[in-house]
Image (cartoon, rainbow, N blue to C red):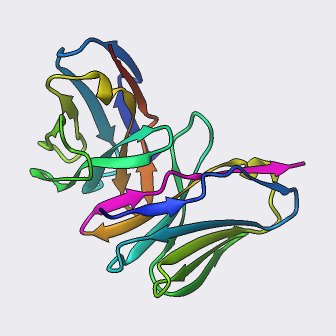
């Protein structure tokens, strides 16, 4: 079964405490992307990756880092989270169609 | 600033009617256009892609693109209560960069 998994699904943390949200896919897709979703703003692209070691900024990359060392994994790193990064985060891949992960709800206090 | 605009709704239609969802975009060079459906508390789901002017039909869904007017729409025929969701319009602005609209909430009344 085609699957995109994200962990954790829910996280409450404090300002400045580094965190990583993992994203893994089992479809051997080259393209992966991270989005955040906020009320009234829709989805906004943070970073995307066209293949291993190839990443590029989306619309709102500030405060985030990514890495793509393996094709299946695309972690999102918040080195010093701030309250304005409180949001719902989705990882997605593109292959025959687009697949989204289940989402990670992050709260930064 | 590249933008994608959608009416936030809610758009309310009776069961069996045609629901018409509209989207405008600012980047005239955009080539790929997408419609997603998102149920409350769930992930978005890609339901239509359209790349050239005109209509593209898939079951009860029809996507319409008019690049000259920078306008893309989604028609849902024979609307069902299960179609009640938020519909997101998205535009690829080059490479793999995608801009989403804020979404239109659709309610289909039984």
What residue occupies the far front of the structure in this picture? B1
Q: Is residue A81 above or below residue A90?
A: above
**Bounds of the magenta segment:** B95-110
Q: Looking at the image, which is closer to me, B53 or B22?
A: B22
Q: Residue at x 18, y 34 (%)?
A: A63
Is B87 placed left or right of A101 in the picture?
right
Which residue is found at the position 17% from the left and 19% from the top?
A18
Left or right position of B57 against B81: left
Give residue A59's position: percent from left, percent from top.
Answer: 27, 52
Task: Give the answer, above or below, for where A17 lies relative to A51.
Answer: above
* Residue at left offset 37%, top offset 78%: B31
Tell me if A89 is positioned left or right of B62 in this view: left
Q: Quadrant of residue B54?
A: bottom right
Instruction: Report x, y in % for residue B39.
Output: 62, 42
Residue A58 placement (x, y as % from top left): 24, 53
Q: Nearer the viewer, residue B73 or A102?
A: B73
Magenta stretch: helix, strand or loop mostly: strand
In the picture, the quarter occupied by the C terminus of chain A is top left
State whether residue B108 is above or below residue A22.
below
Residue A61 highlighted magenta (yes or no): no
Report the number of numbered marks.
0
In the rendered structure, does residue B99 fall within the stretch colored magenta? yes
Query: Who is closer to the viewer here, B3 or A29?
Result: B3
């Amino acid at each position: 079964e085609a699957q995109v998994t994200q962990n954790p699904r829910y996280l409450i943390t404090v300002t400045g405490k580094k965190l990583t949200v993992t994203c893994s896919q089992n479809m051997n897709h080259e393209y992966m992307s991270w989005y955040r979703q906020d009320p009234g703003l829709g989805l906004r692209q943070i970073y995307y990756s066209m293949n291993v070691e190839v990443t590029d900024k989306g619309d709102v990359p500030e405060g985030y880092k990514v890495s793509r060392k393996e094709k299946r994994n695309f972690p999102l790193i918040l080195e010093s989270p701030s309250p304005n990064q409180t949001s719902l985060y989705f990882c997605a891949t593109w292959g025959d169609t687009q697949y989204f992960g289940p989402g990670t709800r992050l709260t930064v206090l | 600033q590249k933008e994608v605009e959608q009416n936030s709704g809610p758009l309310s239609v009776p069961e069996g009617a045609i629901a018409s969802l509209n989207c405008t975009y600012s980047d005239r060079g955009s080539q790929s256009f997408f419609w997603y459906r998102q149920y409350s508390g769930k992930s978005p789901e890609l339901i239509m892609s359209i790349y050239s002017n005109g209509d593209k039909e898939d079951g009860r869904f029809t996507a319409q693109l008019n690049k000259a007017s920078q306008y893309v729409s989604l028609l849902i025929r024979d609307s069902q209560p299960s179609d009640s969701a938020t519909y997101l319009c998205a535009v690829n602005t080059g490479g793999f960069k995608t801009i989403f609209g804020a979404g239109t909430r659709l309610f289909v009344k039984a």
